[in-house]
Image (cartoon, rainbow, N blue to C red):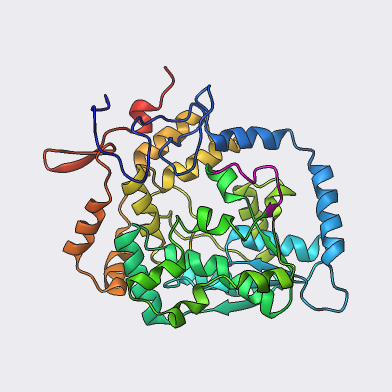
Amino acid sequence: MIEPKDVQTKYNLPAEVRFCKRCTISNQRPRISFNEEGVCSACVFAEMKKRVNWDEREKELIELCDKYRCNDGSHDVVVPSSGGKDSAFAAHQLKYEYGMNPLTVTWAPHLYTDVGWRNLQALSHNGGLDNILFTPSGPVHRKLTKLAFEILGDPFQPFIYGQVNIPLQIAVKFKIPLVMYGENAEAEYGGSMKNAESPISDYHDDIKEFAFSGLSPEDMVMHGISKEDLYVYLKPPIDALDRNDTKIYMLGYYKKWIPQENYYYAVQHAGFSANAERSEGTYSKYASLDDKTDGFHHYLSYIKFGLGRATADTAHEIRDGHLTREEGVQLVRKYDGEFPDKYFKTFLDYCDITEEYFWEVIDSFRSPHLWVKVNGEWKLRHTVAEDGVDD
């Protein structure tokens, strides 16, 4: 379609919609960049990974582990973990391949799915990994979820607060300086390339910019949440992190990150189970399985940026060589934007809202440069199937 002139845009998105020439992502993803050839930063990063000497990177990982490894049985690395395939891979590798003693730390999802709970239990009972599960106050979390849905257009944001910050709190309390995440999500999926060639993430600046969409948990005070209720969502004081000499590393710098291979590894070594059916909005069965509200995070991405769950999945699998671009486009055409109906009533009840109000909020996050009403139905002005093909 032809982009209308002077159309309003939201979220500081570029008015001209462009799709990557290699994958299915567009320039509407926050913080993504495109080169002169029309290739997105995530695809450029995937090409960079092909030139990495992974044997040398592994030597660097061994040196890092040697620096922090404890030989008395105490925990020497904190691994944030949902029990999913990627964190199971990271923690299991650190323990059994590199001789570390990880403490996996889990921030509970809003509402566990059956398969998500089984996978968390398997992390310890099958994978042999120690785990701390932190579950926040239900009433506070529900209120934060509703606020995040209304203000940010992402009901998942309170989970992200805890997922990012509770491992740092545990690291400080247990005096464990090393925190090891999995992949560099910004570089891998199409965001800032700031740390693309570094194994370290800076807790001083990176967290709010990359993980919190500019809205930190402290900002929720102005929306009626008390500082006391927010305590568990907060990053430890900077001076406490500094005194602990806390360092955040990313395993994906040292080990070539391939989500599908991580899945096979987690099944074999940590008792991981895929979903019985594909996840709504995509074709896959093994990612983001643990939370009944997860589908609404992906659906809001589709509403705000025109990029749904199938786009994210196909883009990465194209970069990994598991799909051609043409196959990815067809999967996006078939599944992207599928409504997460399975837990819709559960989500409404959790947030204590009506279906009418849900759709009112949803429509408020549609950017006019992406959406138009045709015969009473919302339609994307641009899709990868129509606009993303090579000229």
Above/below status of 348 relative to 205: below
Look at 40% across and 75% down and name the residue there: 141
Q: Is residue 278 left or right of residue 92?
A: left
Look at 32% across and 61% down and name the residue there: 151
Label tally: 0
**Magenta segment, principal secondary structure?**
loop
Determine if residue 187 is in view: yes
Closer to us: 164 or 134 = 164
> Residue 358: x, y in percent?
23, 62
Closer to us: 56 or 236 = 236
> Residue 218: x, y in percent?
45, 69
Quadrant holding the C terminus: top left
Look at 16% across and 62% down and name the residue there: 356
Give the residue furthest to the front. 239
Q: Is residue 44 left or right of residue 97?
A: left
Q: Is residue 134 left or right of residue 14?
A: right
Above/below status of 263 relative to 24: below
Above/below status of 138 relative to 99: below
Determine if residue 322 is in view: no
> Residue 334: x, y in percent?
35, 40
Above/below status of 186 relative to 26: below
Q: Is 191 part of what is drawn in magenta? A: no
Quadrant holding the N terminus: top left
Identify the image quadrant of residue 124.
bottom right
Closer to us: 130 or 264 = 130
> Residue 361: x, y in percent?
24, 58
Identify the image quadrant of residue 256.
top right
Q: Which residues are magenta?
A: 192-200
Give the residue furthest to the top. 391
